[in-house]
Amino acid sequence: MKIKHLTCYILLQLVVSFAFAQRDYDLINGSNIYLNTGTKMVPVYSLKKANINKLLGKPLKIKKVDNEISESIVKEYVYPSASILFEDANFNSVDMRKTGWLFVFKTAKGFGKPIGIGSPITLLKDYFPNSWRTRHKDGMSVFLAAPEGEPVDVFISFSFKNGKISWILLTPNES
C-alpha cells in the first residue's frame, strides 16, 4: 500500500515539475481555498492541531505516519471524507478520497461551485484554464500562491477517472 501511494506521489511530482518548468499553469492564493464540510466553510490554512476538533469535529482516528520524504513523523487526522496531516503543529496537507467534503475556491466574483470527489472534471476548466490546457489524461495540478502572487512550493492536485474527480491532494511539493 505504501508503494502504491509513493508511486502516485512521485507521478504527481513529475506532473507538477513539468508544469512548473513550462510556466503554463494557474495560481490560486492559499487563503482562497475552503473546505465545505456540509455544516461549515473552513479556510484550509486556518487549520491547526490546536483547533482542528473545533473546526472539523472529532476525527474517526489519529494516526502517526512516517513521512518518507521529509523523514519525519506526521499526525494524520482521519475523517470520513478526507485525512488532514500535520507536521509538528503545522498544517501539512489534505488528502480527499471519498465523497462528503468539498473544496470551494474564492474568486473575485465570490465563492465558486464546490468541487469534490465525483465532481465532473469540466468544473476545473472554469477555475484553472491554463492548468486545464496542460492537464494529463489522469489529472492536473494547480500551484498555490503567496498573497503577493508569487508561487509557493505547494500545489493542489486532481486525479481523474471516467470524467469525474477521483482524488484531491493539497500538499507541499517536497521533491
Image (cartoon, helix red, strand yellow):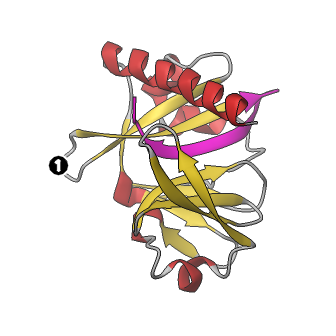
Disc 1 crowd rating (10 Å Cα; few below 14, some 14-19, many 20+) is: few
Q: Quadrant of the N terminus?
A: top right
Q: Is residue 108 visible?
A: no
In the rendered image, which residue does mark 1 sit on? 148
Element type at mark 1: loop
Of 106 and 1, the residue lying toward us: 1
Q: Which residues are magenta?
A: 160-175
Determine whether, in the image, residue 41 is placed left or right of residue 163.
left
Query: In x, y percent, where is residue 50?
Result: 45, 81
* Residue 9 on the magenta span: no
Of 16 and 107, the residue lying toward us: 16
Q: Which three-letter amino acid code belongs to the residue tagged 1?
A: Glu
The residue under the point 58% across, 61% down is 84
Q: Quadrant of the C terminus?
A: top left
Q: Is residue 50 visible?
A: yes
Of 42 and 124, the residue lying toward us: 42
Determine whether, in the image, residue 32 is placed left or right of residue 93.
left
Q: Main secondary structure of the magenta part?
A: strand
The residue under the point 68% across, 50% down is 116
- 35 relative to 3, above or below: below
Query: In x, y percent, where is residue 103?
Result: 58, 56
The residue under the point 63% across, 39% down is 123
Residue 168 in which image quadrant: top right
